[in-house]
Image (cartoon, rainbow, N blue to C red):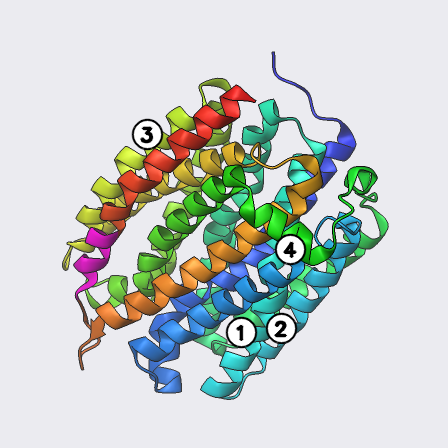
Amino acid sequence: MKSKFQPYQIFVIALLAFLQFTLILDFMILAPLGAILMPELKIDANQFAKVVSVYAFSAGTSGFLSAGFADRFDRKKMLLFFYVGFLVGTFLCGIAPNYSFLLMARTVTGLFGGVIGSIVFAITTDLFEFNVRGRVMGTIQTAFAASQILGIPFTLYLANHWGWHFPFLLVVGLGAPVILLILFKLKPINAHLKIRSDKSPFRHLLATVRNPRYALGLSSTALLSIGGFLIMPFSSAFSVNNLGVGLEQLPMVYLVTGLSSMFLAPLAGKLSDSWGKYKVFVVGSIITPVMVIIYTHLDRVPLHVVLIVSVLMFAGITSRMISSQALLSAVPEPAYRGSFMAIGSAIQQVSGGLAAVVAGWIVVATPSGRLENFNVLGYVMVAISPITLYLIYKIDQMVKKT
């Protein structure tokens, strides 16, 4: 029998989902804006990869630095502090006059935004039992789909008409009311303080990193992130310059894949709770590599082919993402939950940043804008998939024994 959520729990889920929507939108709009940014700022593929990866590296740095303190404060206060900083950084992106300023602004945004995801998942784990976390995370992750349905097509439209700065300013406008909701409506989340370790922040961090149980979870997080970041930064440029999707058609690609993800994310969450988190991950791990190979080998094709392949690829990615997050939430003990999530977020960001940089080295943009060696990224992602599947299997077995 399904557990029914209380009104306050529904509010928390909705708040975290909308917060994630603004966070993901800020990060994801860079990929579709790539086709506009590169010619406007007169930068090449490698420089654009740096714009993407600098966020990841700064987010990873702040994640490691905050890990020792993550379990020492009320999670509400942590969330409020980092979300305000994230919006300040996003505003700076919205007024960036050149490439150098944009790099600085993305660094600031990453320093604050990179920690928010770990706080969100720590709150989710604190407030919801393991047997419903798939549903909760599936709902929260609809923010990913919503950013594609509502955010990316709309921001692309705005960027095409009013310039690439405007989407960042839109994120700031959407995020400002969230600050008030966190401040006045969200209750303190401090139960973990009663069982807080007496270790210093540095020793608390070391204890988390040295725990073999946690190391296994963090390793799987790194590999999952590498796979995702290899292809995503260049997806819009690939669609426009290789697949023949027009800039005016690009929002349709994100709209259709987002609508499918809006349906698939809650479904993957429910199946993770009822059928099994590892089983859902296995299904996603079968679908994803097949569709990645097909996608990265496409050339100029009709729009409906691009849409079908993209929807199927995101079905696999969504299944892997939600099931693995729900499973990994059971790994840390309450006293180390914030630290584990913060380090996991840091590793996720750094791994993703490295993947984006490597992708920038592999992919070459020709004078016409066409991307060469994009299929190589698909091969690398497929090679990583079996290793990730094995690590998630080990984590599943470990969780079942506890």
Tag 2 residue: 89
| Secondary element at tag 1 | helix
Measured Cα–Cα span from mark 1 to mark 2: 7 Å
Q: Residue at x 53, y 34 (%)?
A: 326
Q: Earlier in the sequence, mark 3 or mark 1?
A: 1
Assess disc 3: are there few (<14), some (14-19) or many (≥20) residues with their C-alpha within 10 Å of its C-alpha: some
Whether residues under marks 1 and 2 lie with C-beta atoms below 8 angstroms apart, the answer is yes
Decide which of 254, 111 is in the foreground and name it. Answer: 111
| Magenta stretch contains residue 374 | yes
Looking at the rendered structure, the kind of residue marked 4 is: Ala
| Secondary element at tag 4 | helix
Q: Residue at x 17, y 58 (%)?
A: 375
| Secondary element at tag 2 | helix
Measured Cα–Cα span from mark 4 to mark 2: 21 Å
- Nearer the camera: disc 4 or disc 3: 4
Range drawn in magenta:
373-380
Tag 1 residue: 106
Percent coordinates x, y for residue 122 in the rendering? 65, 43
Could you say which disc has been placed on residue 283 in the image?
3
For residue 236, side relative to residue 179 (left or right): left
Measured Cα–Cα span from mark 4 to mark 3: 33 Å
Whether residues under marks 4 and 1 lie with C-beta atoms below 8 angstroms apart, the answer is no
